[in-house]
Image (cartoon, grey):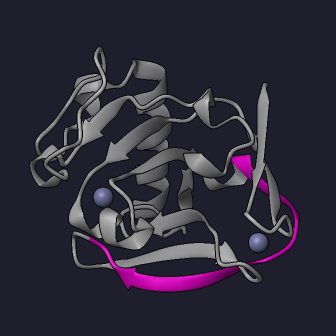
Amino acid sequence: MTAQEGGCACGVVRYRVEGDPIFVNNCHCTLCQRQTGSTSVVNAFFESERIILTQGELGDYVVTSGSGGPHTICRCGKCGTAILSYYPRLGRLGAGLRVGTLDNPGAFPPDAVIFTASAMPWVSFPEGIPIFEQTYAPADILPPERLERLMTMVERRKAGEG
Ligand SMILES: [Zn+2]
Ligand SMILES: [Zn+2]
């Protein structure tokens, strides 16, 4: 299984992530704009066990997600760089990894550009990547193998895990 490495801005936190993401979103919603101070965020979603912290510690910072539940952003305890997030739907079973923290941030191109309705008006979107004004149903764009990984986590969550 191929692996990528990444870390925070100060170098204290380092991680390894194994295999391919289930899906990658480039999100232009206003919450992501506020959390990053930028046009959008790129999150690669993985089963949490595929993201291995190899150095340093993360601290939890909880904000409210778009759906109203807790969105936990895990940041370097020293410099505050956001490394990954947990969302209400999957709890801690699955994490959205901030693609910009990879040593090779081009490794995981987005599967979808989402919430373009709230994109900053001067932003342009990439060619060849599906674009959605809001969001999408995973079954509409994910290959079966990736959809199955997602549904496995959804079932585990329903069974009380995470
Ligand atoms: Zn740091
Ligand atoms: Zn967003």
Whether residue 143 appears in magenta in the rendering, the answer is: no
Pinpoint residue 5: horizontal percent, then vertical percent: 79, 43
Whether residue 52 appears in magenta in the rendering, the answer is: yes
**Is 86 on the left or on the right of 41, as rendered?**
right
Q: Which residue is located at x 19 percent, y 39 percent?
A: 136
Q: Quadrant of the N terminus?
A: top right
Pinpoint residue 97: horizontal percent, then vertical percent: 57, 53
Task: Note whether 78 is above or below 100 in the view shown.
Answer: below
Task: Note whether 129 is above or below 3 in the view shown.
Answer: above
The one nearer the camera, 143 or 148, is 143
* Residue occupying the far front of the picture: 122
* Residue occupying the far right of the picture: 55
Secondary structure that dominates the magenta span: strand
Q: Which residue is located at x 79 percent, y 33 percent?
A: 3
The segment highlighted magenta reads 50-65
Pinpoint residue 101: horizontal percent, then vertical percent: 65, 52
Q: Quadrant of the C terminus?
A: bottom right
The one nearer the camera, 72 or 41, is 41
The one nearer the camera, 31 or 93, is 31
Pinpoint residue 158: horizontal percent, then vertical percent: 39, 62
Q: Which residue is located at x 56 percent, y 60 percent?
A: 93
Q: Quadrant of ligand 1?
A: bottom right
Q: Which residue is located at x 74 percent, y 83 percent?
A: 77
